[in-house]
Image: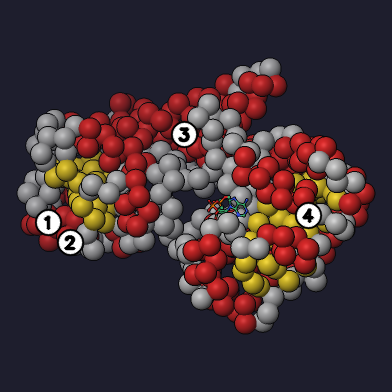
């Protein structure tokens, strides 16, 4: 059992802090957001993540998990300090490390006994060396700390399960002592034979970018294939299925759609291109992945305009705002691009999402948010499905059609069968499948 401070109580920090507490460690979670900490102290979970509320409750009751805004107290109480603060894209696409170094600055001022500083945030290659340098330059003796890179691979929407049963744990450090402590922290996973990749710091940092860039590449690749399928009359669903049956390729991340979003893939792919640029090379493949994705997000509205060329004063219904199902996260969601493009053309929007409306309201307070699919469909000139929540997969399309002003359905997640929808009399479009609309 180790005493841990988790700095940053967001999607990663809250799940990781709670997971580490569940592994038997004593975890104090720190955040600068007072409202968030107050709510957590009252047992209110600030994000939507399946299974998280029960796990938080259990570990708080066992006395292994607590929340504070007092960073200094958390530093003093802990042997290991995890950083799970944001690392967003700076305007030039580079990684904004200001949150990391704000936290490191506080640590530098209050570090009195040996601590291990673990970076869980996704940070550009070389950041952990910079953290070491910063601490030394700010008067912290080298024997008072070690740094570790421990990138996180959880997926929002299944974050608890991913953290409790990861495919691997990556630990980058040059200190045998820190490595030993990290192994102890993750002992529970060791017992279920989770592979632990122990490596040097820069390799650990690189593993995270390479992994995310590869997954993003699969998505942009299949989206490009989907666009080609449309032109040559092939069906991307079948192409992807057959490709995925090849064990060398694998079936995951081969779903054609409106492009990837979320807080990781867009910023991490961009960051990788910048890291390469600074290292004196071009990451040509990843550059193309970013470009294809930016174009793909716009294709949804291009499809809409094909059937409804003038959307000025027309009402468009949108089902799904989160960048994927089972999360309330809308960061870089394709919905942001779609809404923006529709508004710029004078269209009006009625939107529904089971969990993400409060987040989208922060970006677009001017659109109408409704409480159900039915309300999102009533009287609209066209309907776009943008997130494949389960509740959108089996809609009574006949009934929905009767509510719509015009029966135009753009299925950006390919969740309906074109034949079935067309038989019902819809004007239908999706991504990468052959469509024979009767009315154009
Ligand atoms: N979200 C994911 O799915 C995911 C997955 C893997 C890795 N990551 C990486 O993890 C990191 C965190 O991402 P996230 O999605 O959890 O971010 P988030 O924005 O949800 O949460 C970050 C939290 O840190 C807090 N914070 C900021 N500065 C602070 C400080 N100085 N002291 C204490 N708290 C502070 C913020 O108030 C916020 O609550 C990023 O580097 C991200 O790239 C994210």
The residue at which mark 3 appears reads as 220
Q: Answer yes or no: do the residues labelled 2 and 3 have beta carbons within 8 Å?
A: no
Q: Is residue 299 left or right of residue 139?
A: left
Q: CA distance from mark 2 to mark 3?
A: 32 Å
Between 113 and 210, which is closer to the camera in this rendering? 113
Query: Which quadrant does the C terminus fall into?
Result: top left
* Quarter residue 184 falls in: bottom right
Quarter of the view holding residue 369: bottom left
Does mark 3's beta carbon lie closer than 8 Å to ligand 1?
no
Observer-side mark, 4 or 3, equals 4
Residue 390 screen position, x and y as percent = 35, 61
Task: Residue 95 in the image: state x and y as whole percent.
Answer: 60, 34
Would you say the residues marked 1 and 2 are in contact, meaning their CB atoms lie under 8 Å apart?
yes
| Residue at image mark 4 | 110
Q: Residue at x 14, y 45 (%)?
A: 315
Which residue in the rendered view is the most extreme toward the top? Answer: 280
Question: How far apart are labels 1 and 4 at the CA level?
Answer: 58 Å
Question: Mark 2–mark 4 contact, CB under 8 Å?
Answer: no
- For the N terminus, the image quarter is bottom right
Q: Give the number of the disc on residue 333.
A: none
Q: Is 384 situated left or right of 245 in this image?
A: left
Disc 1: which residue: 378
Can you give x and y, in whole percent of width and height, for residue 221 in the image?
47, 32
Residue at 66% x, 45% y is 102
């Amino acid at each position: 059992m180790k005493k841990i401070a988790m700095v940053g109580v967001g999607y990663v920090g809250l799940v990781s802090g709670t997971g580490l507490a569940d592994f038997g460690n004593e975890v104090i979670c720190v955040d600068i957001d007072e409202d968030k900490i107050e709510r957590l102290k009252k047992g209110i979970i600030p994000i939507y993540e399946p299974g998280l509320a029960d796990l938080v409750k259990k570990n708080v009751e066992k006395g292994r998990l607590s929340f504070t805004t007092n960073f200094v107290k958390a530093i003093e109480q802990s042997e290991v300090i995890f950083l799970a603060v944001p690392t967003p894209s700076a305007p030039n696409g580079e990684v904004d490390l200001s949150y990391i170094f704000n936290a490191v600055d506080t640590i530098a001022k209050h570090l009195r006994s040996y601590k291990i500083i673990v970076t869980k945030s996704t940070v550009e290659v070389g950041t952990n060396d910079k953290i070491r340098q910063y601490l030394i330059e700010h008067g912290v003796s080298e024997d008072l700390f070690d740094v570790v890179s421990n990138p996180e691979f959880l997926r929002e929407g299944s974050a608890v399960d991913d953290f409790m049963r990861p495919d691997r744990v990556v630990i980058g450090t040059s200190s045998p002592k820190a490595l030993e402590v990290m192994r102890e922290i993750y002992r529970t996973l060791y017992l279920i034979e989770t592979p632990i990749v122990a490596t040097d710091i820069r390799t650990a940092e690189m593993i995270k970018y390479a992994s995310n860039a590869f997954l993003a590449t699969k998505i942009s690749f299949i989206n490009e294939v989907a666009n080609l399928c449309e032109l040559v009359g092939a069906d991307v669903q079948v192409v992807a299925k057959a490709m995925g049956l090849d064990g060398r390729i694998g079936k995951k991340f081969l779903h054609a759609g409106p492009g990837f979003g979320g807080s990781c893939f867009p910023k991490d792919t961009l960051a990788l291109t910048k890291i390469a640029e600074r290292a004196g090379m071009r990451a040509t493949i990843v550059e193309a992945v970013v470009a294809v994705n930016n174009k793909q997000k716009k294709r949804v509205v291009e499809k809409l305009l094909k059937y409804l060329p003038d959307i000025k004063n027309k009402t468009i219904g949108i089902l799904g705002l989160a960048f994927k199902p089972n999360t309330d996260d809308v960061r870089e969601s394709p919905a942001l691009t779609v809404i923006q493009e529709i508004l710029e053309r004078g269209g009006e929007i009625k939107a529904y999402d089971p969990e993400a409306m409060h987040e989208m309201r922060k970006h677009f307070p001017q659109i109408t948010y409704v409480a159900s699919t039915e309300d999102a469909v009533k009287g609209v000139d066209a309907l776009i499905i943008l997130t494949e929540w389960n509740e959108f997969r089996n809609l009574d399309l006949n009934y929905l059609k009767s509510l719509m002003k015009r029966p135009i359905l753009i299925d950006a997640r390919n969740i309906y069968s074109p034949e079935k929808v067309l038989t019902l009399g819809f004007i239908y479009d999706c991504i990468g499948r052959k469509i024979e609309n009767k009315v154009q």
